[in-house]
Image (cartoon, rainbow, N blue to C red):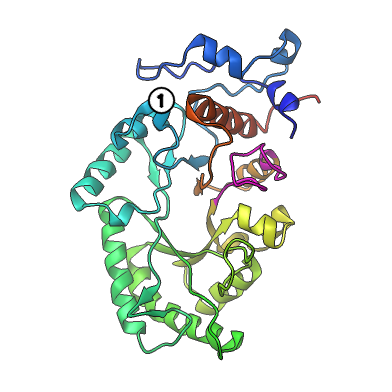
Amino acid sequence: MKKTTHDAHAIQNTDLNRRGFLSIGAAATAGLFAASNAAQAQAPSATAGKKFKLKYAPTFGAFEAHAGKDPIAQLNFMAEAGFSALLDGGFLNKPQELQDKLAKEMEKLGITLGGPYCSTTLGGQSLVAGTDKKADYAKHYKGVCEKLKRANGKWFLVVPGALLKGMTMEQMTANLIENLKAIMKEVEPTGCIMTLEPLNPRNHAGLFLTKIPQAMEICKAVNSPSCKIVNDLYHQQITEGDLIPNIKAAWDYIAHYHLGDTPGRKEPTTGEINYRSIFKYLHEKGFDGVLGMEHGKSKGGKEGELALLHAYRWCDAFDTPYKI
């Protein structure tokens, strides 16, 4: 989408300072969201500060220029800006004291924790390499679930492993399914959900799992409500495209999403993906999971953070007609 079209639907109210926490200068706001009176009349109804329709999940650091480095202050900024989820891939590697502190603050603010990343290599062996460590994997992920529950979390993310020389896709698939079935015996009773992430081979060469249909067939074979998919729309636009039909086909197996436009992996509206239409589809289908904002910003500093907020406000206002 061209910048001129984007600016033509700027959000009228960018003052997020509902409780005196945020401070966005009028000059900076005017500079970023400049638009004609006619264009302002066409602006989406959603206003900055209003809770978003879907659970878009910023990462720590996404609003550091405004909120500072303190993660508690950043969580409060996110909540003030209308976000109701957090994506923190390294959450489970943080000290327990900090995990507990963050979990308490997120509960107070109504912020849901998106699926943090978990290693899929034990003793140098991945989930696709063999099945002799399946009991160790089951024990490992049971521990992951116990940590998640203390933080009011539900999802965790895994990348099954790399392609192995001398082993066929059928062998690796069979190994993965057998390992996952053993793991699910420990994960399922906790109510937590493991999500498998397919990654595009252009940016992540040599990995076993690359496509949503491939992940869906694995989930079908494992046959557990705790074995699902995270659909990273950046990766899938590169690998297979046809995003909404593929979402529809795999709907029952997708637990949450990662976001990022392409090319560049920056905020929505900076590339070719029509996130406004995708968000509308997910909302109409009743999706209530987390959409992790796993991307960078097209601009630096406070200007970039305002551009990010602007992009999500515009895409989230999918129920408001606009003219080009």
Q: Label 1 belongs to which residue?
A: 66
Q: Is residue 5 left or right of residue 170?
A: right
Q: Amino acid at mark 1?
A: His
The residue at the far front in this view is 300
Q: Position of residue 183 (x, y in %)?
A: 38, 76
Magenta segment main secondary structure? loop
**Which quadrant would residue 71 be assigned to in this image?**
top left
Q: Position of residue 4 (x, y in %)?
A: 74, 24
Q: Is residue 152 above or below residue 147?
A: above
Tag 1, which secondary structure? helix
Q: Is residue 321 visible?
A: no
Point out the stretch of residues depicted in magenta.
258-276
Q: Is residue 106 above or below residue 186?
A: above
Q: Is residue 81 visible?
A: yes
Along the line of sight, the residue nearer the viewer: 114 or 89: 89
**Which quadrant would residue 268 be assigned to in this image?**
top right
Q: Residue at x 28, y 50 (%)?
A: 151
